[in-house]
């Protein structure tokens, strides 16, 4: 899938950007923001997949070796 890149200007907390940069191991602010956005989208997809799985099993996980 082809990415569309668009220039944007935002007022962001510099300290938050630097903290995220350390956590994510990114070099540039743009890379940091992009990675953070991707992680948020991935987390939303994962949460939805987990909800679908739990709904399908009526909230019960039946797996060998799993005690819960």
Image (cartoon, rainbow, N blue to C red):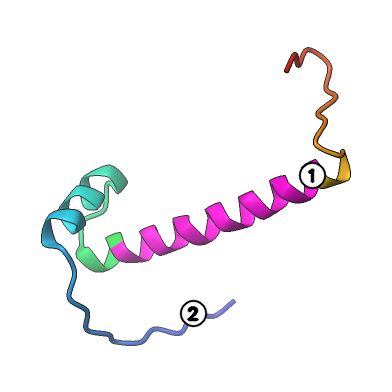
Q: Which mark is residue 53?
A: 1
State which quadrant residue 12 falls in: bottom left
Q: Which residue sits at x=22%, y=79%?
A: 10
- For the view shown, which residue lies furthest in the front direction? 58
Q: Using residue 68 as the reference point, say whether residue 41 is left or right of it.
A: left
Which is more N-terminal, label 1 or label 2? 2
Q: Name the residue under label 2.
A: 3
* Residue 6 picture location, percent across and down: 35, 87
Magenta region: which residues? 33-54
Q: Which residue sits at x=54%, y=52%?
A: 43
Secondary structure beneath dot 1 equals helix
Secondary structure beneath dot 2 equals loop
* Residue 56 picture location, percent across and down: 87, 45
Q: Pick the quarter of the image with the N terminus.
A: bottom right
Front one among 1 and 24: 24
Q: Which residue sits at x=23%, y=52%?
A: 21
* Residue 37 picture location, percent across and down: 41, 64
Front one among 3 and 52: 52
Q: Using residue 20 as the reference point, say whether residue 66 is left or right of it.
A: right
State the separation of the CA atoms marked 2 and 1.
30 Å
Q: Which residue sits at x=78%, y=50%?
A: 52
Front one among 62 and 22: 62
Q: Alpha-carbon neighbours of circle 1 within 10 Å: few (<14), some, or many (≥20)?
A: some
Q: Most prominent secondary structure in the magenta stretch?
A: helix
């Amino acid at each position: 899938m082809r990415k569309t890149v668009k220039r944007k200007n935002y007022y962001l907390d510099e300290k938050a950007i630097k903290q995220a940069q350390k956590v994510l191991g990114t070099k540039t602010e743009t890379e940091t923001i992009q990675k953070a956005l991707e992680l948020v989208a991935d987390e939303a997809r994962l949460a939805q997949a987990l909800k679908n799985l739990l709904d399908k099993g009526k909230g019960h996980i039946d797996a060998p070796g799993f005690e819960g």
